[in-house]
Image: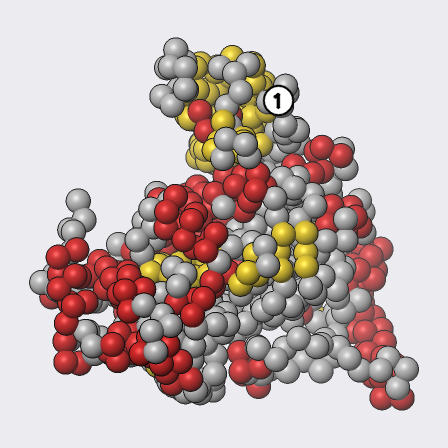
Amino acid sequence: MAKNYENEINQLTAKLTLEEKIIMLHGCGLFRTGEVDRLGIPSIRMSDGPMGVRQEFPDANWIPCGLSDDYVSYLPSNSALAATWNPERAYAGGQVLGEEARGRGKDVILAPGINIKRDPLCGRNFEYMSEDPCLIESMVVPFIKGVQENDVAACVKHFAVNNQETERLAVDTLVDERTLREIYLPGFKAAVQEAGSYSLMNAYNKFRGVFCSESKELLDDILREEWGYDGTIISDWGAVHSTKETAESSMDIEMSVTYNFDDYYFAKPLLEAVKKGEVAEADLDKKIKNILRMMYRLKMLGEEAPERKCGAYNTYEHQQKTLQTAKEAIVLLKNEDKVLPITKERLAIEKTSTPDADGLFSARKKKIAVIGINASYQHAGGGGSAEIKAFYEISPLLGLRQQMGGNVRMEYARGYYIPGKKDVNEVNWQEASLERRVMGVEDPDSEEQKALRKEIEENRARLREEAVNLAKDADEVIFVGGLNHDYDTEGRDRDDMRLPYGQDELIEALLDVNPNTIVVIVAGSPVEMPWADRAKAIVWSYFSGMETGNALAEILLGKVSPSAKLPETFPVRYTDTVTYKNEEFGKTDVVEYKEGVFVGYRYYEKEQVKPAFAFGYGLSYTSFDIKDLQVKAVGNADSNLKDTVVTVTATVTNTGDMAGAEVVQCYVADPECSVVRPVKELRGYAKVFLNPGETKTVTIDLPAQAFAFYDVEKKDFTVEAGSFVVYVGNASDNCKLQAEVVL
Ligand code: BGC
């Protein structure tokens, strides 16, 4: 049982002067609050972010300190983590992040990001987990526990309904109550109630006309009152817009991106407001108590302080955990004619079958063509606040070379051209983040733009030709392309879902000369794949951290079988998405979530739009048989169903000849209900590791909540008595087993 510090907190609060309270309520540096030396209260030191601990910044400058001791482990993005469908990987990821944060002397790590992937074009989707609340809940809880066992606070973000980057600082989000409760809030609720997140970050946007930083509805009514949250609420950087309103809401600490710390709303203006009697000091005391509570929990204060963990970074253990996650995060989307894995035999030196006239054999190394900039690209340093100063990053090319060894002739060609690519170190992203609203305003008809386009075309053609020539007589062709953090980035949404830099044309050309070309896409969010029917092997990797290259090589070479599943639907084309159709994404003033609960597969299934690759989909090198579904309701007699548990069991057998893992997914449908419900909804899953021939029984317990919808009248979740269908399978579009259950 965690110790209760309320006495200490009350006493300490009573000792603080008004000025000292103010110091604790706002940023006194870009990533820290002020300290109160007189009472031994230290600064709270914070850092981004989800993919590792960000480099060090001075108190008042967005130009990094440029130190040599802030290189860290670069961890798989939350998208990659979710693709593992393995809560143990989320726990391991949290442990690594927490230990590294503590090792770097941090108190709060600004992670995880768990906003719903409502539209594939959202620039920050790579930082988020899924389109599905159940998958998010299952991953966010172990992640936060992993972080916090290191005496570091997780800061789950961005609360709430922050689902686009366009005008993110001001856009007003309108979402109906049922949708809010069923889709957008469950991840946060689990983070607060089940994981006990010590802190939470409110979002930039408005919710129902009010900035999230001062939304009484979100912060007071839902978070504090209903969910009983007693941790610290930290504003997103620059998300506070008022003194009195925000002070009177539950928001505790104001952080921002500018250096005028004394002018922050929660600095001098708040001091003045209290002195003038416009804001009650008691409101500040509530905030101070929330902050002190977090500090005691972190052992920053009090008698437990000497026991506080000291952390560690760049350890071998962290690297191994990261590698394991990356291996489980790579999704095999397509594999025909056994193009994958590339076997040892295919890479062996070839000798002529018969000797020549002089009795001599000749030997030939196999030629491996690796094509595409993402094969040699390092992604760690980009994306916005999620950027990482990586201790190392194994690119796919490096991973492949290391693992293929010297008996093959590997040759690399860039294949496509990225115009005007600046080194990540030349761009200071955050400095401009508040102004970064207008992008791409150049006149397309100007001479300069025309000349630029011509140059781009010429370069593309040249690089494409070079790549095709390389591929022509190669034994294996591996294309590694996709997106980078110019596209998967904070502060901007993508314009379309297409692959940039002429990659589609290049892929088609490679498939022309070698139909067995293996297409690997590294990206943070879905892309259209117009060549998908022609390609025999398609592999998907989210930004998977410093071990991406090693993990990818192990997958391509068949040292490990892929076991990841898509945590989001990949539509065939952007125009298939509901947000394209209802035109309610990327608007700059008000965005109304008109699709309601029909987000992701809930929409595609309802409208019977066939996606390119469905939610929960992913192939393996081995095969599995899921059968013997049994569904049993226990405790059903209880009329309010509070104690009801529906136990779902099935057996899984590895029917192939390689060890592997399958994700058994359990969806629930309520065919007859007073409200329109999705065709089915994910309510549980289990990842099972099996040797060839091995069988295991999987049990998934579904509480009554799994059958519930949010009843707007009753203001609560409710289960309507009657019959439900439980579906079990290995993808949302492949649930062959089903059973009825009556509640
Ligand atoms: C982002 C947050 C981040 C903060 C601090 C903001 O721009 O939205 O996710 O934690 O900056 O860098």
In the structure shown, which secondary structural element does the residue marked by tag 1 occupy? Answer: loop
> Residue 247, relative to residue 70: is it above or below?
above
Q: Position of residue 511 (x, y in %)?
A: 80, 54
Taking the spot 49% from the left edge, 46% from the top edge, the residue there is 185
Depth check: 577 or 276 in front?
Answer: 276
Depth check: 304 or 417 in front?
Answer: 304
Taking the spot 85% from the left edge, 76% from the top edge, the residue there is 457
Mark 1 Cα within 10 Å, few/some/many (few <14, many 20+)? some
> Residue 378, relative to residue 112: is it above or below?
below
Taking the spot 34% from the left edge, 50% from the top edge, the residue there is 229
Q: Position of residue 146 (x, y in %)?
A: 32, 52
Which residue is denoted by mark 1 in the rendering?
673
Q: Is residue 312 left or right of residue 211?
A: left
Q: Is residue 691 left or right of residue 34?
A: right
Q: Position of residue 387 (x, y in %)?
A: 50, 71
Depth check: 92 or 367 in front?
Answer: 92
Residue at the farthest left position? 303
Q: Is residue 148 visible?
A: yes
The image's colour scheme reads: secondary structure
Q: Position of residue 90 (x, y in %)?
A: 41, 49
Residue at the farthest front position? 277
Taking the spot 38% from the left edge, 23% from the top edge, the residue there is 642
**Could you tell me how many numbered marks the image carries?**
1
> Residue 268, relative to residue 504: is it above or below?
below
Q: Is residue 261 visible?
A: no
Picture quadrant where residue 71 is located: bottom left
Picture quadrant where residue 54 is located: bottom left
Query: Amino acid under label 1?
Result: Cys
